[in-house]
Amino acid sequence: MSDALEDLVGAFQPGPTPGPGRTPGPVGMTILLLLWAVLGLMPFVFSVRDLELATGRIGSPGTLTIVSCESLGEGRYDCKGRFVFDRGGDTVTVDASPDSTEGDVKRAQLTPEGDRAVPAGTTGVLAALTLPFLGVGVLGFLPYAFLYVLRIRRGRRPAVILGCLLTVVSLAGVVVGMVAAYS
């Protein structure tokens, strides 16, 4: 074989595998577990505002009519709508969800800034809960990981069962939220 071919074949050979005891260590493992916990909690933090809007806690209620949806390419759209306040008054042109269709009319909540309207009611709440359900899935097996890292054998089986249940609940919640968002 030529040297170039041997170098190419050698590049795809498996490298050394880590032996026993080659873990990040206590400090590294603590950092990894903390990052895992932060990653699982961030969806809850980022969804608070959308939940407040969908439940009507903030913003103004009204009706949104989608006026136009312009294709931005690659399956992306920029939709504009006309928002009519329940209390009457002027209509406002706002940004609408990119999954809207021209002519759609739905209950909506206008953001306090007045630039965007999001679905209100059950559909809006289910759509806003998609992200928290994703966070539940991320956090599902964290208790088991803590038990494993701390070398605690008692309670691992219930932690795995809990992780499986939370993952199923998470998947169901994400699917329901996505269906609600796109309906």
Image (cartoon, rainbow, N blue to C red):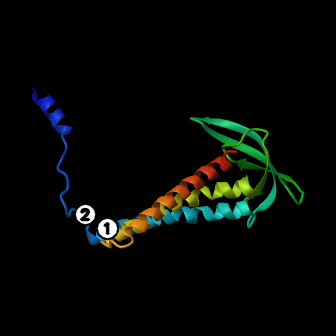
- In front of the other: 142 or 68: 142
Give the number of callouts. 2
- For the point 17% across and 33% down, the residue is 9
Q: Amino acid at mark 2?
A: Thr
Q: Indicate the position of residue 72 as horizontal and vertical percent values.
A: 61, 37
Q: Is residue 26 above or below residue 117?
A: below
Q: Residues within 10 Å of mark 1 (few under 14, many from 20)?
A: some
Q: Relative to residue 63, is residue 158 drawn left or right?
A: left
Q: Residue at x 67, y 45 (%)?
A: 182
**Residue that appears at 45% across and 63% down:** 161
Work out how far the residue at label 1 is from the one at label 2, CA to CA, in angstroms. 8 Å
Q: Amino acid at mark 1?
A: Met
Residue 54 in sight: yes
The residue closer to the viewer here, 94 or 43, is 43
The C terminus appears in which quarter of the rendering?
top right
Res. 112 in view:
no
- Considering the image in quadrants, where does the N terminus appear? top left
**In this figure, which residue is indicated by the disc labeled 1?**
29
Report which residue position mark 2 lands on. Answer: 23
Label 1 SS: helix
Q: Residue furthest top?
A: 1
Determine contact: label 1, label 2, CB under 8 Å: yes
Q: Residue at x 33, y 68 (%)?
A: 148
| Residue 67, image quadrant | top right
Q: Toward which corner of the image does residue 120 lie, by quadrant?
A: bottom right
Q: Classify mark 2: helix, strand or loop.
A: loop
Q: Position of residue 65 (x, y in %)?
A: 80, 45
Q: Does 174 sit left or right of 182 as displayed?
A: left
Residue 70 on image: x %, y %: 68, 37
